[in-house]
Image (cartoon, rainbow, N blue to C red):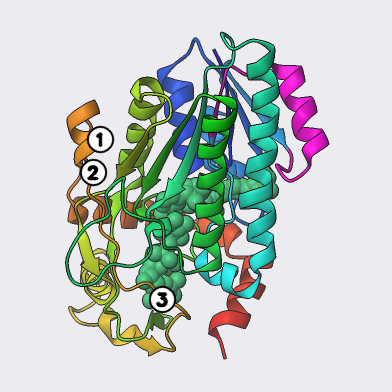
Amino acid sequence: MKVLITGGAGFIGSHVVRLFVNKYPNYTIVNLDKLTYAGNLANLKDIENKPNYTFVKGDIVDADFINKLFQEHQFNAVIHLAAESHVDRSITNPLEFVYTNVIGTVNLLNAAKTLYKADPSKFTKFYHVSTDEVYGSLGDTGMFTETTAYDPHSPYSASKASSDHFVRAYHDTYKLPCVISNCSNNYGPYHFPEKLIPLCINNIKNNKPLPIYGKGENVRDWLFVEDHARAIDVIFHNAALGSTYNIGGHNEWTNIDVIRLLCDMMDDKLGRPKGTNQQLITFVTDRAGHDLRYAIDSTKLQKDLGWKPSLQFEEGLSKTVDWYLQNEEWLTNVTSGEYANYYEKQYQN
Ligand code: NAD
Ligand code: TDX
């Protein structure tokens, strides 16, 4: 089994690559990644020399390159995670999200279709990793199920929704063997520090303001990234072709409560008097089109395939903070260069 994993040098992709390389020594795992600001081979140092692992640097937007890669490797399956993933960047530069998330996905579907048509017994699965943001925003009650109508609001979620539609269209039109999952907000090691939790961990460490959009009342459903990787493993191996699974933590928090918990936890870990870090909380202008609440109903995944989250939020958050405090060099490296310039522009004025 030769599996192409796209976006494997990013946050979630690196956990998926690690899990597959270690758990399935008889699979060949090819990690294709453009290494944008969000992709970092340091995320995979521990497995880079494993005999069943290969890295290829490349852009999914380049159709010729993708077609050649598929012909050369004759992949049996694809797990597609490569994407532009940050909502705020999508508001600044929507086209980048159309190129990578929509056109990049269609390029992969076309290359997979060619292999599938050549020999349907050899190309067995195109697994598209997507987000709960395609479902839009909830009010105070209710949860997203697999049948909730799509209602994306940000350029990011619109691009992911579009890619999901193309995957379903290729399944229905060309019989390409496809599976989709839509997951809630992940957190954990290797999370790029432009996203809420790692940004605030880094800022608390450096005594910098913690920018909370609006009143901090928006709700997210947080899942530890290794639990997402386990769900991807279970779905990849067991889901019926053409099916969709929602993945979530049943773990809803307002942003302000997450950050207060993080501040208190890091007071303890950094030996600061209780209440010190909460003084860094700064309410800033709200994100445009900011979705109020996400909550995932993952009953189908739990019932059909027996998956459930393994960690309580406090435990996962504590592990995450410890990882960031122990990996200063990683944090320094990824917050220099292009990211530092972006950060200056977004938050420092
Ligand atoms: P990330 O931004 O950390 O990583 C994305 C990876 O894709 C990076 O390694 C980057 O270099 C690579 N990439 C970007 N453009 C590329 C291109 N044109 N060609 C090849 N590689 C390219 O993202 P993430 O948070 O790990 O998310 C991974 C996937 O999971 C995405 O599809 C995202 O939509 C989805 N998702 C994320 C979350 C979350 O909470 N982070 C939740 C649900 C779903
Ligand atoms: O500085 C901040 N201040 C703030 O209040 C940032 C970066 C975020 N926020 C808020 C916005 C959201 O309500 O925190 C919440 C979480 O924000 P992000 O970390 O940017 O994540 P979100 O927009 O919810 O999207 C994430 O989850 C779904 C991922 O980035 C997506 O890739 C995934 O699909």
Find residue 223 and report its horizontal and vertical position in percent.
29, 50
Q: How many labels does the image show?
A: 3
Q: Which of 201 and 282 is in front in this view?
A: 282
Residue 264 horizontal/vertical position (percent):
21, 72
Q: Do the residues labelled 1 and 2 touch (CB within 8 Å)?
A: yes
Residue 46 lies, with reference to residue 22, above or below; the image says: below
In contact (CB < 8 Å): disc 2 and disc 3: no
Q: State whether label 3 is within 8 Å of ligand 2.
A: yes
The kind of secondary structure element at disc 2 is: loop
Let me know if residue 68 is in the magenta part: yes
Looking at the image, residue 254 lies above or below residue 48? below
> What amino acid is at disc 1?
Leu
Residue at position x 42%, y 24% in the image: 241
- Residue located beneath label 3 in the image: 290
Q: Which residue is drawn at 58% across and 44% down?
A: 82
**Mark 1, secondary structure of its residue:** helix
Q: Distance between the residues labelled 1 and 2?
A: 5 Å
Of callouts 2 and 3, which one flags the residue occurring earlier in the amino acid sequence? 3
Question: What's the mark number on residue 301?
Answer: 1
Q: Which amino acid does label 3 sit on?
A: His
Q: Which numbered disc covers residue 298?
A: 2
Question: Looking at the figure, which quarter contains the C terminus?
Answer: bottom right
The image quarter in which residue 231 lies: top left
Q: Residues within 10 Å of mark 2 (few under 14, many from 20)?
A: many
Return the x and y of residue 183 as percentages of the image width and height. Answer: 36, 48
Residue 200 visible to an observer of this rendering: no
Q: Position of residue 297 (x, y in %)?
A: 22, 49
**Residue 42 position (above or below residue 26):** below
Q: Is residue 192 among the parts visible in the rendering?
A: yes
